[in-house]
Image: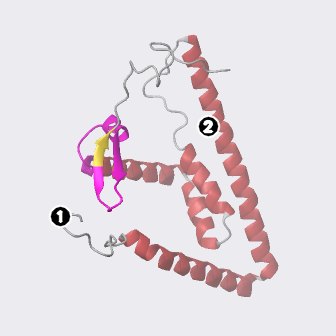
Amino acid sequence: MTTGAPNPPYPTRPRPSKVRRFLPLALVAWLVLEIWLLTLVADAAGGFTVFLLLVGAIVLGGVVIKAAGRRAFKNLSEAVQQAQSGVMPPEGGRSGEGNGLVMLAGLLLIIPGLVTDALGLLLLVPPVRKAVSRRGERALERRMRAASPGTLGDAFQQARMRRPDGKVVPGEVIHDKADPRRDPNPGQNPPLTP
């Protein structure tokens, strides 16, 4: 016989966020808009023209993604070479800035549809890309400030365990360095290659 407060027979589920609630509706509306626009262009210019537009956008998107990937890899290899030679890159010089948005533009071009193609072409314009980047950075900073206090390291150290009765128990993972079962070579890092 157990004592204490009885458990509810069915746990209550949290309500889904607004994004999760309206995302399927927005996706369906976007698909209907894309199909409607494609039929309008097909009626005005012909089906073969729409086909050429879609194939051209896919090819352009692939070229854009490939160029951005090469630029990102080149910047990464230069940074690795500078780090190996002991030369630190200048603080203000970020030549790889915007590669993520350029890749997103290429992805939007590859996705079939006129609205996504227009958005992808807009992201290829440097002033638009810089404005989107600044706005995204500000939104991320606002969310980070609004998050619960603590450091990022604290977030990685915290753990939550669920008990069988559904209760969440907050906890913290502490690794004991002196435990020989966990660390066979105390004070030494394991080799990177076998």
Residue occupying image coordinates x 46% and y 48% = 130
Write down the region rendered in magenta: 145-169
Asked if residue 91 lies left or right of residue 46, the reply is left
Q: What residue is disc 2 on?
A: 72
Image position, residue 53 (x, y; %):
74, 70
Q: Is residue 99 above or below residue 120?
A: above
**Quarter of image, res 71:** top right
Residue placed furthest toward the front: 1
Q: What residue is disc 1 on?
A: 4
Residue occupying image coordinates x 35% and y 44% = 159
Residue occupying image coordinates x 25% and y 40% = 150
1 or 2: tag closer to the N-terminus: 1
**Mark carried by residue 58:** none
**Residue type, mark 2 in image:** Ala
- Front-lying residue, 176 or 56: 176
Residue placed furthest toward the bottom: 43
Disc 1 and disc 2 in contact, CB within 8 angstroms: no
Image position, residue 23 (x, y; %):
47, 73
Q: Quadrant of the C terminus?
A: top right
Image position, residue 172 (x, y; %):
31, 39
Q: Quadrant of the N terminus?
A: bottom left
